[in-house]
Image (cartoon, rainbow, N blue to C red):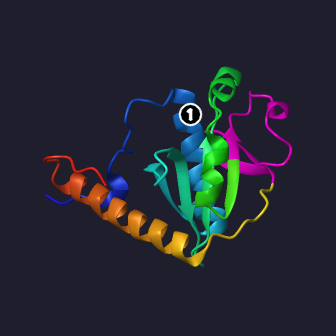
């Protein structure tokens, strides 16, 4: 009996609301279909923060997307400026019912549901240094391989 990765359910760690999962799915779809990005959900960064989504483009560009599902979710989370040093572009992603006016005007903004997403405001570009890009790419390579391994053999967990 064989299974392909495309038929496996998404990995959910229980911290995301149903709304956040829909925004995640739609954003990942848009990044893959429109920009040919490969996306990782829930990526631990070297500074101890965890990016909701991290996408890698075909030329090695790195975008981080911070998902906000409600006004309260945005108000209690002030760690998002710390993501900038780990990406070339930073975006917030929100569901359609959340007012986009709560987000800073100088940050990228996406609107997403479970089917797709649209860019409401593009993010400025701030290129990563080559050393930082290499470190992130190595971390993502190991993370991706480990996630596939855990799908194939859900034995003991390893922290990367």
Q: Residue 152, position in %: x, y?
A: 19, 56
Q: Is residue 12 magenta?
A: no
Instruction: Indicate the quadrant containing the C terminus: top left, top right, bottom left or bottom right.
Output: bottom left
In the image, residue 146 lies at what x, y percent? 27, 59
- In the rendered image, the vertical position of residue 103 relative to residue 62, given as above or below: above
Q: Is residue 119 magenta?
A: yes
Horizontal side of residue 128 vs 12, given as left or right: right
Compared with 22, 110 (above or below) is: below
- Vertical comparison of 64 with 37: above or below: above
Query: Within 10 angstroms of label 1, few (less than 14), some, or many (20 or more) residues?
Result: many
* Quadrant of res 9: top left
Q: Could you say which quadrant of the image residue 35 lies in?
A: bottom right
Left or right: 36, with 118 as reference point: left
- What segment is highlighted magenta in the picture? 92-121
Residue at 27%, 50% in the rendered image? 159
Q: Residue at x 20, y 47 (%)?
A: 157
Q: State the image coordinates of residue 107 (x, y, percent, origin top left).
A: 78, 48
Tell me residue 15's x, y (percent): 44, 30
> SS at mark 1?
helix
- Residue matched to label 1: 20
Q: Kindly identify the residue that appears in the image at 59 percent across and 69 percent down.
A: 36
């Amino acid at each position: 009996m064989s299974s392909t990765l495309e038929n496996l359910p998404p990995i959910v760690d229980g911290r995301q609301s149903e709304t956040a999962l829909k925004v995640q799915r739609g954003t990942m779809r848009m990044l893959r279909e429109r920009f040919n990005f490969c996306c990782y959900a829930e990526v631990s960064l070297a500074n101890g923060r965890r990016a909701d989504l991290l996408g890698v483009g075909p030329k090695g560009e790195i975008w981080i997307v911070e998902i906000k599902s409600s006004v309260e979710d945005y108000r209690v989370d002030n760690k998002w400026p710390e993501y900038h040093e780990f990406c070339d572009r930073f975006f917030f992603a929100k569901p359609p019912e959340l007012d986009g006016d709560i987000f800073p005007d100088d940050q990228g903004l996406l609107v997403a549901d479970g089917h797709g997403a649209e860019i409401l405001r593009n993010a400025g570009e701030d290129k990563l240094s080559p050393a930082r890009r290499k470190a992130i790419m190595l971390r993502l390579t190991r993370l991706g391989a480990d996630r596939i391994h855990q799908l194939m053999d859900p034995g003991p967990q390893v922290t990367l």
